[in-house]
Each structure stands twice: as structure tokens, then as C-alpha cells.
């Protein structure tokens, strides 16, 4: 077979693979994050081994963004995402809900569980710890235009025959640093839909849009919780 024939065969196989919608399954994303939290938190003592906090005034917040660049997550957090979260913590501080915030990096954790993360948060002077996690899924499929015109090959570059739907779920959990208590948790979802030629539709663009939408909603929900509960005081 000549090179052109190989290209045609590869394209046809690709188009067949993404011909029909498989749907976006929120329950699968929820299970992924639940399993990950269970592994990360690990076993907690039946009773707290530390004294309750007696701090006065707004608490200091430790912020940790869980790494997501591996199987079943579909994205990795960017510096822009972290910048958005830090700008949000600045707003919390201006409103008197927290006294300040520190972004905790993975390199500061001596281990891979919540216990080690809480120790790192204490070293940074944090009273409460917010852990942000997320996962996404993509459903890529063709519409009737793709079925009719993609066989021409040029159609793959100029016909709006491919859909790329992205669903992102993000979750935030607030923990007491000096105790073993989860103070509250929230989750939010974002949805993106892109339609275009299969050769030009980028799934990652849809995931990015869905992630930013979900993160914006999560920050709004968390802020309401901070205001309602007195920032975990």
C-alpha cells in the first residue's frame, strides 16, 4: 500500500471509532474523586488526638491543588488555575473571612496522604486546609455531516462534522489543620460543547473551558460556605 492509502485507512479507522456518542457520565467522575479522596485521607482516628483550635480572629488558609495529570482525569492544573484560586483567596482576605493564604506545593509534602499535608500546612502557619481536586471526561462523536463528507478527506478539514463534549467535575474540601475534622465540602461541574472539522477540533480546549467554568462555580460555593460557617471558626 502506498502512503496515501495508509493515510486514508488510518483516517477511516479513526472516524469509525468516534462515530457515535458515548455520553458524559458524571457518576464515573464522582467515583474517581471519591476513591482518590479515600486513598489520600487514609484512616482517621476514631477521636481527635489534638485540642480544638482556640484561635482568635479569621483563620489562615492553606491551599493545596491535587495533581491530576494521570489516568481518568483528562487534564492537569495550570499556573493560570492556581493564579485564579490565589486571587480568590485574596478576595476572602479582603472580606475578612481569612487572615491570609499559602499555596502548598507537592514538594513540601513528606508523603502522599492527608496527615503529611496537614503537617506541611502547619509549617506554613495555616489553621485550615482547602484541598481542590478535579477530573474530566470527553465524548467525541460525528454528526451526519461527518458521516456523509469525511470520506473525501478534505471534509475532515472543512466540514463541521465532529462534536467534542467535555464535562469537568471539581471538588473542594476544607479541613481543620490541627484536628481531624472535615469542616465542609463542595463540588461543581462545567460543560463545554465544540463542533467543527475532526482534524481541527481539540478536545483539550473543551476540557479547559469546562474546567474554568466548574472552578468559577466551586469558588462561589466555597465562599458562601466560608461566610456561613465563619471560615471554620
Image (cartoon, grey):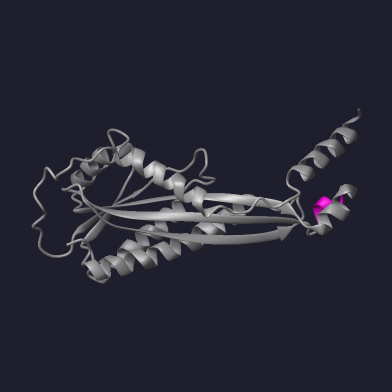
**What's the residue at 29%, 66% (across, down)?**
225
Residue 41 vs 1, above or below: the answer is below
The image quarter in which residue 207 lies: bottom right
Magenta segment main secondary structure: helix
The image quarter in which residue 14 lies: top right
> Residue extending furthest top?
1
**What's the residue at 67%, 55% (across, down)?**
164
Q: Is residue 56 magenta?
A: no
Q: Is residue 157 magenta?
A: yes
Image quarter where the C terminus lies is bottom left
Look at the image and tell me whether residue 76 can be seen.
yes
State the extent of the magenta-drawn residues as a range. 154-158
**What's the residue at 23%, 60% (across, down)?**
100
Q: Is 60 or 39 nearer to us in this picture?
A: 39
Q: Position of residue 169 (x, y in %)?
A: 48, 55
Q: Position of residue 142 (x, y in %)?
A: 76, 53
- Taking 97 as reference, is 68 left or right? right
The image quarter in which residue 40 lies: top left
Q: Position of residue 209 (x, y in %)?
A: 56, 59
Look at the image and tell me whether residue 91 can be seen.
no
Q: Position of residue 2 (x, y in %)?
A: 91, 29
Q: Is 133 or 101 nearer to us in this picture?
A: 133
Amino acid at each position: 500500500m502506498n502512503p496515501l492509502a495508509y493515510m486514508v485507512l488510518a483516517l477511516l479507522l479513526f472516524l469509525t471509532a468516534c462515530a457515535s456518542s458515548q455520553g458524559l457520565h458524571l457518576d464515573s467522575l464522582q467515583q474517581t474523586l471519591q476513591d482518590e479522596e479515600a486513598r489520600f485521607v487514609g484512616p482517621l482516628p476514631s477521636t481527635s488526638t489534638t485540642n480544638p483550635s482556640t484561635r482568635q480572629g479569621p483563620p489562615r488558609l492553606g491551599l493545596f491543588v491535587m495533581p491530576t495529570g494521570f489516568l481518568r482525569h483528562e487534564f492537569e492544573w495550570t499556573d493560570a488555575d492556581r493564579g485564579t484560586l490565589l486571587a480568590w483567596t485574596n478576595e476572602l482576605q479582603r472580606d475578612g473571612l481569612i487572615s491570609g493564604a499559602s499555596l502548598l506545593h507537592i514538594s513540601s509534602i513528606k508523603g502522599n496522604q492527608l496527615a503529611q499535608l496537614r503537617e506541611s500546612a502547619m509549617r506554613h502557619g495555616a489553621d485550615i486546609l482547602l484541598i481542590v481536586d478535579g477530573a474530566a471526561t470527553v465524548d467525541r462523536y460525528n454528526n451526519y455531516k461527518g458521516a456523509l463528507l469525511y470520506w473525501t478527506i478534505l471534509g475532515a478539514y472543512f466540514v463541521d462534522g465532529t462534536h467534542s463534549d467535555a464535562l469537568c467535575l471539581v471538588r473542594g474540601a476544607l479541613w481543620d489543620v490541627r484536628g481531624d475534622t472535615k469542616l465542609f465540602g463542595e463540588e461543581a461541574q462545567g460543560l463545554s460543547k465544540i463542533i467543527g472539522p475532526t482534524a481541527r477540533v481539540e478536545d483539550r480546549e473543551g476540557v479547559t473551558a469546562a474546567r474554568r467554568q466548574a472552578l468559577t462555580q466551586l469558588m462561589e460555593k466555597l465562599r458562601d460556605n466560608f461566610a456561613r460557617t465563619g471560615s471554620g471558626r
